[in-house]
Amino acid sequence: MLKVISLYTLLIIINFLITKQKTCGKYEVPNCKTCDDVKEKCIECKSGLFPTYAGLECSSCNDESIGGQMACEGSCDSSKISISGRVLCDKCKTGYYSIEGICTLCSSGSPNCKRCSYEASPGSTQKIYTCLECVNNEYDISDVDGICYH
């Protein structure tokens, strides 16, 4: 017995095959591995990605990268999402510092910085950027502002 497939269903199937997107209920979620069709959301994404925007998108911990590698070294908590929609990271790789769970290149605080920290000074809650190591011996770290100078 042949079943008649509606044109709408056929278009959804063709679109899925072309885009290789997972359909979670009525939503297409790129890079989704497992859906909850009842709640119409993605609950598990492909490796290295995490559900965001109420399960309607898969996102990496951080979009920043060194040589194509993720900036996040620790684990990602998909229940904690930044305003920009990125999953927050609990520990950044060397060469990055964390600003509220978003890994940022050390060189963004000081152009010639290779390793840095972003921590509160003793007795204070205000975090301060400090370069811990410059890119090479031609640069020195200032005791005043923690930035690499030539």
Image (cartoon, rainbow, N blue to C red):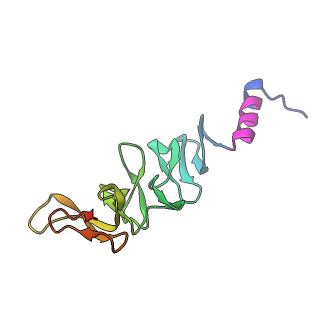
Residue at (24, 63) in percent of width and height? 147
Decide whether residue 2 is among the magenta residues: no
Count of labels shown?
A: 0
Which residue shows up at 54% across the image and 59% down it?
A: 68
Q: What is the quadrant of the C terminus in the image?
A: bottom left
Q: Is 11 placed above or below 127 here?
A: above
Per the rendered image, the range of residues in magenta is 10-20
Q: Based on the picture, tell me whether residue 11 belongs to the magenta stretch.
A: yes
Front residue of 74/93: it is 93
Q: Which percent across, then down, holds residue 47?
A: 58, 59
Quadrant of residue 131 within the rendered picture: bottom left
6 on left or right of 36: right
Q: Residue furthest right?
A: 1
Residue 113 location (% of width, % of height): 33, 65
The vertical placement of 26 against 113, above or below, is above
Instruction: Please indicate whether residue 45 sits to the left or right of residue 117 in the image.
Output: right
| Residue 15: quadrant of the picture | top right
Note whether 30 is above or below 89 in the view shown.
above
Depth check: give the residue in front, 146 or 16: 146
Front in this rendered view, residue 121 or 83: 121
Left or right: 108, with 142 as reference point: right
Can you give x and y, in whole percent of width and height, for residue 2 in the image?
89, 33
* Pick the front one: 6 or 11: 11
Give coordinates of residue 83: x percent, y percent.
35, 43
Q: Residue furthest top?
A: 7
Q: Main secondary structure of the magenta part?
A: helix
Placement of the N terminus among the 4 image quadrants = top right
